[in-house]
Image (spheres, grey):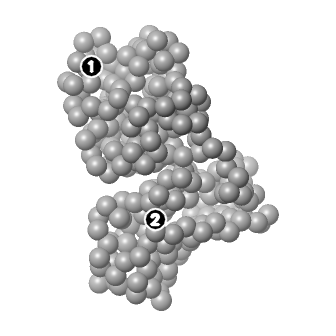
Amino acid sequence: MELGLDVTERDGRAVLSVRGEVDVYTAPRLRERLVELVAQGKHQIVVDLEGVDFLDSTGLGVLVGGLKRLRSHDGDLTLVCTQPRILKVFEITGLTKVFAIFDSVDAAVAS
Amino acid sequence: MQSVALEIPARAEFVALARLVVSSVALSRRELADDRIDDLKLAVSEACTNAIEAHGAIDAHERVTVRCEESDDRLDILIEDRGAGFDPTTLPEHPPVTDPDRLNFERGLGIPLIRSLVDEVDFATSDTGTSVRLTIYCGPSE
């Protein structure tokens, strides 16, 4: 199962675009990529979930861990997501109150 | 009643296969909307992840069984493992999402998600394994 992870720079922020399915098999790759970015000094990260077809609690856990890691560096992790089926996972778990979720990368970068 | 059974190795790369099989069965049911199929896929993914983690790395050759049982008014998915059992009623509670300590909890979201996503869930656990039954009420097969 492929997980696409592409990083671009926008206004001093790293934009990590995720494609495919995030589950117990693929989530470790997402975690590794986030850890790498933080180690490179990227402390403002936008994770774009628009290309994600599926996300379960393993993926949520990686994002929570990423947010915790970034906040310990006075940074932040924001999300881009408009897909109802992915947003629903955040809503059920209450994590919509933990993450800032935007409807476009432009909006996330401007925040 | 008719049933479809899938046996997968207790390894992470096979959870996607379990989702695929269950969603294929669910797609054939009348009166089951796409968002309900998404709910079921997610619940199955969570239950299979728990089953695989119950076996742990040393038991990766063990098998997890995923069985779809179709009745006229319901679809039941049974996920069975042979790992050490657990008590779903004694899971630690997370701090409220507004509490900064909430970020210390990367795990433990799976069972609450399962409970929210399906109409009924039943955990039967013992020293020899755990069986999770997920039920969605829906119309019969096409």
Query: What residue is shown at x 52% (from left), y 59% (from top)?
Result: B115
For image coordinates 51% across by 69% down, the residue present is B120
Classify the position of the C terminus of chain B by image quarter. bottom left
To which quarter of the image does residue A17 belong? top left
* Same chain for the residues under marks 1 and 2 in the image: no
Residue at coordinates 36% horizontally, 59% vertically from top-left? B38
Measure how far apart labels 1 and 2 are at the Cα level: 36 Å
- Specify the amino acid type for callout 1: Ser
Residue type at numbered disc 2? Val
> Looking at the image, is A99 positioned above or below residue A87?
above
Element under disc 2: loop
Would you name the residue on which mark 2 appears?
A: B118
Q: Is residue B73 left or right of residue A17?
A: right
Looking at the image, can residue B4 be seen?
no
Q: Residue at x 49, y 31 (%)?
A: B98
Q: Nearer the viewer, residue B92 or B5?
A: B92
Total numbered labels placed on residues in the image = 2
Question: Which percent across, then down, holds residue A15?
Answer: 31, 23
Residue A68 as seen in the image, left or right of residue A18: right
Chain of the residue that carries numbered disc 1 in the rendered image = A
The residue carrying pointer 2 sits among few (fewer than 14), some (14 to 19) or many (20 or more) residues within 10 Å by Cα, namely many
User: Tag 1: Cα neighbours inside 10 Å, few (<14), some, or many (≥20)?
Assistant: few
Specify the quadrant of the image occupied by residue A80: top left
Q: Is residue A96 above or below residue B4?
A: above
Residue A67 appears at what percent x and percent y? 47, 25
Image coordinates of residue A5 in percent, x first then y, are 36, 32
Residue B57 x, y percent position in the rendering: 69, 47
Q: Tell me the residue that label 1 is attached to.
A: A111
Q: Nearer the viewer, residue B133 or B103?
A: B103
